[in-house]
């Protein structure tokens, strides 16, 4: 799943020209506004259908999730087809693999099936992944992934604590992501991986602070490989949030935290923070719009589409449940275009 050699950006001229043409179909803020202002959920769904969502499947409003999943699959099919080195797309697909592994292991240990929350596509088909885990045969999966599964099985056997599965698999996921980014030789992908780890650690810190967990627990769950030193999190766990803001004020995350902390303290919710984190990542990948060739525009398009699908889901849920328009707008991520 990693590369034998670094990415050759010159191979991406055709792929980028295709992406530039396809990008024109991305939904804009005005498209989302039209969906929000639609009189009925059916009208909102029609806007997605007009934007060529899915595979042309005839779906009713309460089946909107089928349409979104089809679109998600379509994006990855396109990028695998366009990328001269399609294995780089696995850097983003493996999040689904690790999610599915958690589901399969917890189902096995609890004796309860939970196939309804399996996510596709992954870098490994979910059915194949399930068989590998059942047979304890990990030779056809990346070493990091197989080792993490073995560690989960062994550790759960001694602790009987299902939470340990999440901790082990999350660490393996981000380690794996960084390995793929590092092997690619792309400074863009390496920086993106570091930012994703930092943001994940910020969310972990804030959740653990709200739950009043210990320093020891925090150190166990923080993901290695980020730019923010773990000492900063540990030293500020029992202090007011302003102290963490002061420690990170002059880093790239200073403005993000400054915009979020008042809301976190007043609501005890991370909803706004998570929205701002998604906007933060999108603002980083937006610069790919000015790159003539290379892997960057393909990844920019991927994250743009994932954001677009997330927004479509937020709007459809809002319209079906009669959530006020202003509340829906508050939850929307920024559009790429």
Image (tube, rainbow, N blue to C red):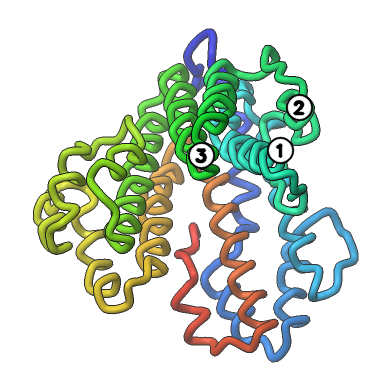
Work out whether residue 108 or residue 28 is closer to the camera in this orientation and state it. 108
Numbered disc in front, either 3 or 1: 1
- Choose mark 3 or mark 2, whichever is in front: 2
Tell me the number on the disc at residue 297: 3
Q: Which mark is residue 134?
A: 2
Nearer-N-terminus badge (3/2): 2
Element marked by disc 1: helix
Q: Give the percent coordinates (x, y) of residue 336.
A: 49, 57
Instruction: Residue at 35% x, 53% y: name it.
Output: 203
Is disc 2 placed on a helix, strand or loop?
helix
Q: Which residue is mark 1?
A: 108
Picture coordinates of residue 187, whole percent (x, y): 36, 27
Dot 3 and dot 2 residues touching (CB under 8 Å)? no
Q: Is residue 253 above or below residue 157?
A: below
First-in-chain label (2 vs 1): 1
Compute the Cα span from label 3 to label 2.
39 Å
Front residue of 285 and 129: 129
The answer to whether residue 294 is visible is no
- Which residue corresponds to the image point at 27% horizontal and 67% vertical from the top-left? 260
Q: Which sits in the foreground, 214 or 61?
A: 214
Left or right of 146, for residue 53 = right
Q: Is residue 241 left or right of residue 158?
A: left
> Label 3: few (<14), some or many (≥20) within 10 Å?
many
């Amino acid at each position: 799943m990693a590369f034998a050699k670094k990415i050759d950006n010159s191979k991406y001229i055709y792929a980028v020209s295709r992406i530039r043409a396809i990008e024109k179909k991305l939904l804009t803020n005005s498209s989302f506004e039209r969906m929000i202002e639609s009189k009925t959920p059916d009208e909102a769904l029609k806007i997605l259908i007009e934007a060529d969502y899915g595979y042309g499947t005839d779906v009713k409003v309460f089946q909107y999730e089928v349409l979104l999943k089809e679109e998600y699959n379509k994006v990855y099919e396109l990028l695998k087809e366009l990328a001269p080195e399609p294995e780089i797309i696995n850097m983003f697909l493996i999040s689904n693999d690790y999610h599915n592994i958690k589901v399969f292991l917890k189902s096995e240990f609890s004796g309860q099936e939970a196939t309804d929350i399996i996510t596709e596509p992954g870098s490994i088909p979910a059915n194949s992944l399930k068989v590998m885990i059942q047979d304890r045969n990990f030779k056809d999966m990346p070493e990091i992934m197989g080792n993490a599964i073995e560690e989960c099985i062994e550790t759960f056997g001694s602790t009987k604590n299902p939470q340990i599965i999440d901790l082990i698999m999350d660490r393996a996921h981000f380690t794996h992501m960084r390995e793929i980014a590092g092997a690619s030789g792309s400074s863009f992908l390496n920086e993106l991986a570091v930012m994703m780890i930092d943001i994940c650690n910020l969310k972990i810190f804030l959740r653990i602070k709200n739950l009043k967990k210990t320093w020891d627990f925090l150190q166990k769950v923080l993901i290695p490989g980020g730019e923010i030193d773990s000492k900063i999190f540990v030293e500020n766990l029992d202090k007011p949030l302003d102290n963490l803001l002061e420690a990170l004020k002059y880093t790239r995350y200073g403005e993000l935290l400054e915009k979020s902390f008042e809301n976190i303290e007043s609501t005890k919710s991370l909803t706004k923070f998570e929205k701002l984190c998604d906007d933060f990542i999108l603002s980083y990948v937006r610069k790919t719009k000015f790159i003539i060739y290379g892997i960057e525009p393909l990844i920019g398009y991927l994250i743009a589409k994932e954001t677009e699908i997330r927004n479509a889901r937020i709007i459809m849920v809002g319209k079906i449940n009669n959530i006020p328009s202003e509340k829906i707008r508050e939850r929307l991520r920024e559009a790429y275009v």
